[in-house]
Structure formats: C-alpha cells, structure tokens
Image (cartoon, rainbow, N blue to C red):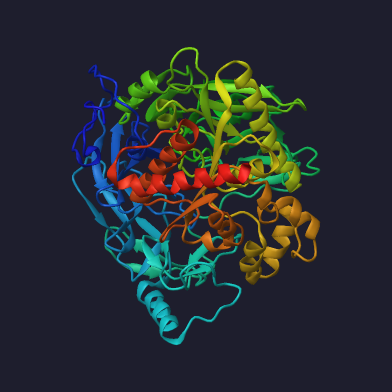
Amino acid sequence: MSECIVRGLLAAGALAASWTSVCQAQDVTPRRLLEVVDLGTPTVSPDGRSVAFRVEQASLERNTYDSVWYVQGLGEPLPRRVAEGGVPLRDSAGGALPATALWSPDGRWIYYRALVDGEIAVWRAAADGSGAAAVTRDAADVRDFALDRDGRELRYSVGATREQVLAAEQAEYDQGIRIDATVPIGQGLFRSGSTEGRLATQRFGAVWFDRAALLADVPDRWTALDLATGTQRALAAGEAAPGASPAAPAAGVEGDPWKSVREPNGARVAVLTRIGDGSGQLYRPDVLLSVLPGAGARRPLHCTSALCTGRPITAIQWRPGHAEVLFTVTDPALGLAQSIHRWNVETGEVRTVVQGRGLVNGGRDASAGCGVSEQALVCVTAEADRPPRLERIDLDGGARHVLFDPNAALALDMAHAAPARLLRWTDARGRRFTGQFYAARRQAGTAAPLFVTYYSCPGFLRGGVGDEWPLASLAQAGIAALCINQLPGYTLDAVERHGQGLAAVQSVVDLLSSEGEIDRARVGMGGLSFGGAVTLWTATESSLLAAASVANPVVSPSYYLYGSMKGDAFVQGLRDMWGLGAPDETPERWKALSPAFKLDRIRAPILFQHSEQEYLYALDYEIPLLRSQRADLYVFPNEPHQKFQPRHKLAVYERNLDWFRFWLQGHEDAAPAKKAQYMRWRQMKSSIAAAAR
C-alpha cells in the first residue's frame, strides 16, 4: 500500500480534504481495491452551508465495515467527525442500503438510522461534533423515520420485536421447518443469511428471490416521539408519517409512471414517465420529464429542450427556492457518464450544470441523488480510474470544488499505473457498445492477454458487477482488462439478450486484436448475475475464451426445481424473462439456453466462486465439469447473491487474479499456501489438453 495512505482513516478525528505530498507510485493491489473509502448520500443543511455524509471502509482484520458520519462546511477544508455510523445495512442480495440523514430545522442535529449493538435505532448527532446518542429505544428495529416540520417530533415505524423474531426462529428449529413456497431452499434453513446485521432465518420476499426475515410481514407500527420531553404516542393506522409516501403522478401524464418528486413546500410535482414503443422490451425505451403545476392546472408541462428529450434521464429533484427541476442524465453512449441539468419550469429554459466522466450523484448507486441547496450541489463523483470523492458544484456557473478526497493516494496510483479509457465500438449489426478499458502493463511490441467482464460499468471500477475481478490489478499484471456495458433496455427474448453480450465480446476482441492491443488466443471472461450468464453463453456459443470465471448459477433443471417451490410467481417470471416452461414443456428452449445441455461445448476451464445461498442451483452442470476436470468450485458461507464479507471479497479477488494469470500467462505465484491450488490447475490443464487431442 502507498506510504501516502493514512491507515485507520475512519477512526481519525480530522481528515485531509486533499493530498499534496508526492509519493512513489504503488501497485493497485486487490487489497487496496477492497479498502476503497466509499461516500454516500450527502445531505445539505437547511441553511445551505454544511453537508452531512457517511463514509464506509472495509476492515479486513475484523471482517466487517467501519462507517462514520461527518459534517463539513461547504467553505471549510476539512470534514468534522460527528458519530459512528454503526454496521452498514444491506439488502438481501448483499448490496449496501443508502444511509440517509435528516437535518433538524435549526441545523444543530442530524438524525439517522444505525445498527449498533444488535439494535437498529434512530440516532441523533450534534453537527458540531459534541456528541451522539440513540433517541429511540424500542424493542423492535426501526424500519423508517421522519421529522415534523418544526423538528420537535420524531415519527418512526417498527415491526415485530427482536425477541419475537428470535422466538419464532427457535420455535421452527425445535419443531422442524415446514417447507412451503416461502422457504428459500438451497441454503441453510436456520440463521444462515445476513439480515439487518445478523445471521437470521429467512423467507422469500415479494420480488423474485429477494429474502426477508421471519415476521417481516408484520405491519408497520408508527410511534410519535416528543424530542423535548421524551413522551411517546402511538399513531393511528391511517395517520401518515410526513414524507413517507412519494408524490404519485396524476392522470393526464403520457407514458408509464416511473418517478415523481413533490416541490418542497409547494404543490408542483416533477414526474418521469417511460414512453415510446416498448415492443420486445421490459420497459419503454424513452423518458419524458414533466411537471404537474398544481391542483388548478388543466395539463402538465413538458420539458421540450433538446437537453431533456430523447435523453436517458435517471433522476430528478427540485432546486430549493427556485422554480427549477434538476435532472440527471446517465448516458450509455458515454459509458454511463452522468450530467446534471436544470429546467426552469416557468420559462422553459434548460441549462447544463455539470458534465462528468463518470458518476456525479450520491454514491455507488447510479440513481442516488446529490445533496442540494439554493446555490450548489454536493455530489459524490467517481470515474472508472478515479475513486470516490466529495465535490461542491455551483448550480449557476458549474464550478467544481473538491471538499473531501479520502482516496487521493489511490487515485494518483491509478493514474500512474492503471489508467482507464472509454472504448466505443460497433458490432456487425451496427449496434453500439461502450466499455472501460485498462491497457496491460507489457513490453513494447507484444500483444497482451485480455480479460472481459460484462453487464454494467458505472463509476469507479473495482471488479465489475459484484466486485470480483480486480481490473486494475489484472492490467498491472500484464492482462488487459475491459468492463463492457450491456445495451440499454432489457430485451425480453433471452436468446437475443445473451446474443447481444456475445456480440459485444466478439466484436471488441476483433477490434483490439486487429490493432495489436491484445492476443485473441488468450482471452478470459468473468461475470456475476447476467454477466455470469453471458460468460457461460460465450463459453458454449463460441471459441473465444481460454478461461472463464462465473460467480452465480444460471438457468438449469436444478435451478428450475428449486425455484419452482416458489410457485406461480417464479414460473411466470421464468416464462416472461426467459421463455422457459418446465424442462419437459419447452425442451428445445432449455437446450438453447442452459449450459446443462451444452456441456460438450465447454472447452475453456471455468472457476466457479459461488455464495452458499445459491450454489446448489448449479450443481447439475457443475458436477460433470468438476468430474471431468474442467472446473474448480469454491463456496463462501453465509453469503448472498453479491458477496460482501471483506475476507471473502479479498479471497475472490486474489483467486481470480491467480486463475487468469495461470491460464492466460502461464504464471504461478510462489507462495507456499497456493501450492495445492496450482497442482489442481496443472492437472486440469493436462486433462483438458488430453481431451482436445
């Protein structure tokens, strides 16, 4: 690690906003990518002078994540640490949930939800850093909360108590768990999945394979807390919490409703709807930006400027004190780079505020919003080779000022050792693709191996979707690395959808090899979720790959068997999204889509690194590959769709680096602990070579 990086960053009382010392460039190792400091959900104070934000960083030693809340004046050089953030909360797929703060109207306090000592409560931290404490002390975990207009009353919701949930889990353990459509079979049935910071017994949620805790369906119970006296009162079932429900689009707006935001202290509502011909797609392809002027208006106002028509608008918010809607464009043609514009709904004028090379928003999620005041945005900016930092962006002039840059040393090393460039190309059918390309460190005149991952590549790239393939580390090791963005939209025909991915890979390999950049005989590929599906599709439908790495199961008879226990929701979803019925209903479609029926076509060795929650779904095609020494399989306990435990993340990073260096470069790490690993892989290489003769 670079000598410029201050260890224990999050525990420090003061943090440098930028680094001015000149240091010798260090390698961008998998551990450095793991330990990137993430910033999330900046929220500007009511007076517009300060911003609250949370930072998060992996701790390998403790196998967890540190999080801390900071407040920084928009004209101050350093942020002020105000509170611990608790254990970061995650969704059931392993993704980080946004950490939002609410300011008191007088700007003295921030309120936030935090998991501390096994309890999720609402906490209050003094903006001057003088202290923080929990303000709710409920027997149940807080699900949501809001402040009233004057900041005197906190309203919060809870469900079942923690003791009730533990008792329900124990009762099942003692009596046996009855398997029905709600039970996620294929994983441990008792306290095997991470839910709200602990290993819990899980049930399927409402959406696809989403998981929830036992008793998660207990209805919300809202309580009002007087912050001055500490007295509480139960809210009636029909009494809405302030701000709990988003403004819904009214009749008369063209298209399918998508997003809406009500003007603060006003009646106008900004609306995004999906429009255009959506034939063959899950969603309509275009977005319409409108405003509903108020109760007396006859029809909505539409944004008609070229800056907002036919553009991929992904987020909207109001500018305080102005008749302006700020909207974010996330442009596939620019590699998912974001720009922010302001639309004056009274004059119709649209002006660009900022055009970024990557994300310009509120964190890693491309749909997260910046903090906003009358004069400025406060955004987390990140580019393919530039880790996250916090910036103030003036709304009228667009001037950008770095407020806080905890990853400055890594950014310098990335710029020196692993810079990325936006690559744009077309396939044989004229379809336009984009990707972020890291050229290999290599000797002049030699073509490098290539690693490709496919799906979505916004912001700072550590390892593609799911963060499993250390792109910068691969490039430094002499393997060019490319993250490819899928085409916009979601094509319902699964064969066509997978074929688009293969076309993207095939066409870019043709391009880079024709330019002498890469050696087309040494191409590797890896992916998670749909990226994993496209990786296996590329392995069965082409001879492009010399090695592959897949992090998740794809459709197979076992996948269908396990999933069918969910009933009609699963069966209909599989039919809608893949065109698949039961294997005996649509046998030809299964033969076209599932690798289980195409094992003879797989010639590239495959590294499978699965989560314990999912790996059983894939064994019908993985066991034959393991027995024929064409695959290696690792399973990570207590992990969901996206692995998140730091030690697991590092193990995955390092094994993927070893795997592709072995198969694409013939390289073996001399570390004694890896001796058995390479012995297996050499045996695989001999077996594959013998089968090819």
Q: Is residue 635 above or below residue 434?
A: below
Q: Is residue 438 above or below residue 645?
A: above
The one nearer the camera, 604 or 112, is 604
Residue 4 in sight in this render: yes
The one nearer the camera, 598 or 348, is 598
The one nearer the camera, 162 or 575, is 575
What is the residue that sits farthest to the bottom in this orientation? 175
User: Which residue is painted at 41% across and 46% down in the image?
Assistant: 652
| Quadrant into which the C terminus falls | top right
User: Which residue is painted at 40% across and 50% down in the image?
Assistant: 644
Tell whether 669 sits left or right of 584: left
Q: Position of residue 157 (x, y in %)?
A: 43, 64
User: Which residue is painted at 63% across and 66% down in the image?
Assistant: 563
Q: Position of residue 384 (x, y in %)?
A: 47, 28
Tell whether 423 sits left or right of 320: right
Q: Is residue 590 above or below residue 354?
A: below
User: Which residue is painted at 30% across and 66% down in the image?
Assistant: 137
Tell whether 386 sits left or right of 534: left
Q: Position of residue 662 (x, y in %)?
A: 44, 37
- Say which quarter of the image contains residue 30: top left
Residue 309 in sight in this render: no
| Quadrant into which the N terminus falls | top left
- Say which quarter of the image contains residue 166: bottom left
Q: Is residue 644 above or below residue 30?
A: below
Q: Position of residue 429 (x, y in %)?
A: 77, 28
What is the residue that sits farthest to the top in this orientation? 444
